[in-house]
Image (spheres, rainbow, N blue to C red):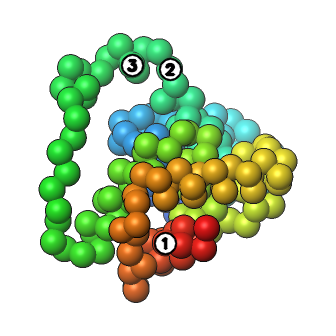
Amino acid sequence: MSETDRDFREFVAAHLERLRALAYITCGDWQLAEDAVATVLSRMYPRWERIEQPAVYARQAVVRAAISEKRRPWWRRERSAGDALPEVSLADHSGPVDERLRLHAALLRVPVGLRSVLVLRFIEGLSVAETAEALGRPEGTVKNYTSRGLEAMRRILGPNLTDLEGDKHVTAFARHSADG
């Protein structure tokens, strides 16, 4: 096995789960998320030696691929009739898990462009500049999308957004949502 192959395998082993989670929270479907990550990794491999910042490149490509997978027309045709039925959410009395599920469900109702900014800013913890670079958009657009995305989340969640201690993602999002 060549050193390049070994480096790529180590990268995949270290980043696969994080990339899958990022894709999932961006598109809301595990199968589409796995397809997006597999597509990105298969495109990265032949160019591996030329990619200067593989983690940054992979994160940007996975967000774009997850959005692209979600928009494909064949995906809409393949959905079963059961997908059109409204989901009935029952309270999960497990506290933080319930709140994270509620936040995730609300996040999936935010338009994909705004959602990708919220995911990178508050779940991945990127700065405005890093988010702009990852999405290939101006910083002003990222700030605007952040504001619009947070406002959409406030409308969806209503006044019941709880600031949970001990969960850095929920706490960060809740803090920023409450600042609005």
Identified at 35% across, 50% down, the residue is 105
Q: Looking at this view, is 162 or 14 the one in front?
A: 162
**Residues marked 3 and 2 touching at CB (< 8 Å):** yes
Residue tagged 3: 76
Query: Residue 34, image x and y in percent?
Result: 42, 40
Query: Residue 152, image x and y in percent?
Result: 53, 50
Say whether disc 2 or disc 1 marks the residue closer to the N-terminus: 2
Q: Amino acid at mark 3?
A: Arg
Mark 2 is surrounded, within 10 Å at the Cα level, by few (under 14), some (14 to 19) or many (20 or more) other residues, namely few
In this orientation, does residue 100 appear?
yes
Residue tagged 2: 72
Kindly state the secondary structure of the residue where label 2 is placed.
loop
Query: Residue 7, image x and y in percent?
Result: 63, 57
Kindly state the secondary structure of the residue where label 3 is placed.
helix
Per the model, the C-alpha gap separating discs 3 and 2 is 7 Å
Residue 174: mark in rendering = 1
Say whether disc 1 or disc 3 marks the residue closer to the N-terminus: 3
Q: Looking at this view, is 78 or 20 the one in front?
A: 78
The C terminus - image quarter: bottom right
Q: Amino acid at mark 2?
A: Arg
